[in-house]
Amino acid sequence: MSNVSHKNQSDTNLYLIASCFVLPLSAVIIFINTIIIIGIAFNKKLHTTTNYFFLSLLFADFFTGVALPFIPRMLMTQGFQYGKCLFIFICPNFFFLSFLANLVMVHYERYLYIVHPLHYACSWVQRYVYGVLLVVWVLPLIYACLPAFGWNGWANDNNSCSTKFLPSAYIYLENYVFLLPGIFATAVMTYRVLSIARKQLHDIQKLHRAVNRGGISEAEQKMTLRHAKCTAAVTVVFLLCWVPYIAYIQVIPLTLRLYVNESTHVILSCVGSGSAAIMPLIVGLSNKQYTELWRNLFRNRCKCWVR
């Protein structure tokens, strides 16, 4: 009996520690996504195909922030009924899968625009925007709902909701067929875009030197420095946002074999999922067009205060 009470107390403490990290992060993700979504929705200049895909990504990221507080409960043993346990597992999984699907689609659309600019206007991404948006939401929903159709490890004799609710085959399929390939695809497309930008920079520098017939000018130095800053920023963002989540994915097989304790699993899941959800916020805030509405509003408000 004492072991059971000690286990319950340990679960409670672990949930409180995880909540202290997850709840503020969830509030920040929801707040910033709301700001950027309003900034895009109320700016008619931003109503383009590229921004539609990014807006869909922001909505997926918003719901991921809403689902973050459920992650500690999902990974800890709780005495929930089947319906509530099913809801706790399906919703966060669906939101994160849709987040990753939208993220891959955003990268692919921009990759297509840069690599094949002449064929972009007649590409399927441009012609079937709403159909593509429907696919990146419906497919994650179908896969996330498979446990509701019977593919789960629910034990009728204990009425408990634990990490064994999802079968190992389901987890391996999701991690190594959907999540890791999706992250790898975004990394490859980003590297390809940066390589093309680097090649174009070299071509511009050659033309500039041919015209000026001199050494390296100040304009060339600025372009090189700007490209270097962009490459460094993209690398740092990728490492900070995705490396913790990739580490979490690699820990899951060890957790299933009981090689990793519950505390490490919960902490890595919260840190990994939270860090991945920050990525669209960094991209959105770094684009001045997305925050133009709020900057103009703040500027007008300051003028009114001065008057």
Image (cartoon, rainbow, N blue to C red):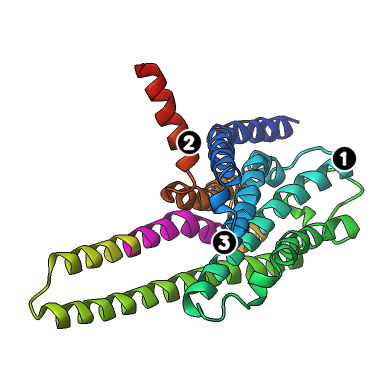
Do callouts 3 and 1 mark residues in contact (Cβ within 8 Å)?
A: no
Judging from the image, what secondary structure is the residue with disc 2 in?
helix
Judging from the image, what secondary structure is the residue with disc 1 in?
loop
Q: Residue at x 67, y 45 (%)?
A: 63
Q: CA distance from mark 1 to mark 2?
A: 45 Å
Give the main secondary structure, helix, strand or loop, of the magenta stretch.
helix
The amino acid type of the residue labelled 1 equals Gln
Q: Nearer the viewer, residue 82 or 37?
A: 37
Asked whether, in this view, residue 289 is left or right of residue 263, the answer is left
Residue for badge 1: 81
Q: CA distance from mark 2 to mark 3?
A: 21 Å
Residue for badge 3: 50
Residue found farthest to the front: 307
Q: Compared to 302, does 248 lie above or below?
A: below
Q: Residue at x 81, y 37 (%)?
A: 79
Q: Residue at x 39, y 17 (%)?
A: 305
Mark 2 or 3, nearer chain start: 3
Q: CA distance from mark 3 to mark 1?
A: 43 Å
